[in-house]
Amino acid sequence: MTDNFDEPDDIPYMDPESNPWDSLLLDLAKQRSGMKKHIMGLENGLFKIQNRRSSKKPSSLASELTQARKKLLQIEEKILDVERDKILAEQSKKESEYLEWWRESKTDEKSSVKKEFDLFISHASPDKESLVRPLAEELVSIGVVVWYDEFELRLGDSLRESIDRGVGNSRYGLVVLSEAFFKRRWTAYELSSFNAIEMGSENMVLPLWHKVSKDEVLSFSPALADRIAIKSSDYSIPELARLIRDRIRSRR
């Protein structure tokens, strides 16, 4: 039985005619296919030598096989690099389109429409138990209308669309900055969304530092590090909720 490497069918669906990243991936996939064929040929040749069916020197063939395998590994690494760059480029494009959409949608008419929520809570899941859930519940209990994922998301909802609606219909965004927050893709998306809405209007982002230092926040976002923030370690949950409520009400 022989393996068929003619078709690079182990790469997801690609559109090389309209997508330069896919064109590059397809070229690399063909290189990988050819190198795999070459390696199979060398392995078969080495097998024949070992069984004394060839006059070629085994050391020469073994060295060539080693070099071919190194080349295959380099191609595989290049494919991974290109796939990563493609994902980052597509994400950046979507975020740019989203920011542009917000700029175009910020008309005088829309800016005068009453927001559905007082506060959108942007956070990382690992912080739910220790801080975010009890804080959200406390805020609701003192009259703040909160968009919090556990309150709003339902089975089958689109996460991106739900976040867009929540951000777009909230007067403020409470950003819970933590080590987990810095590592999450969705939290970065939520933050960039609020930054887009903020352009030309009052500050909407309210930073809450949770077990992070000034240097850590500065490393993540110098702009956020420059804003006056509250620290979860300085207050109880009820105290935090009242501070946030008072900040929101002061701008009504």
Image: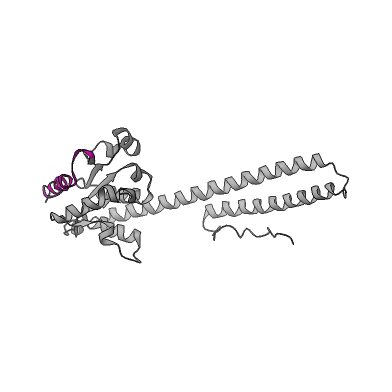
| Secondary structure character of the magenta stretch overall | helix
Q: From the viewer's perspective, tell me whether residue 36 is left or right of residue 224.
A: right
Q: Position of residue 3 (x, y in %)?
A: 70, 59
Q: Tell me the quarter of the image containing the N terminus.
A: bottom right
Who is closer to the viewer here, 36 or 208?
A: 208
Tell me: residue 144, above or below residue 73.
below
In the rendered image, is residue 8 in sight? yes
Q: Which residue appears at 51% of the width and 56% of the height?
A: 19
Residue, far bottom: 156
In magenta segment, residue 108: no
Q: Nearer the viewer, residue 177 or 26?
A: 177
Q: Is residue 198 visible?
A: no
85 left or right of 219 in image: right
Tell me what residue is drawn at x 49 percent, y 47 percent: 85
Magenta residues (range): 233-252
Q: Give me the residue at 34% from left, 66% from top.
A: 155
Q: x and y percent of residue 66 in the render?
A: 72, 42
Report the label total: 0
Can you give x and y, in whole percent of width and height, for residue 23 in the image? 57, 54
Residue 251 x, y percent position in the rendering: 12, 48
Which residue is at a point 29% across and 39% down the rendered structure image? Answer: 211
Identify the coloring. Answer: one colour
Q: Is residue 45 left or right of residue 137?
A: right
- Residue 4 relative to residue 101: left or right: right
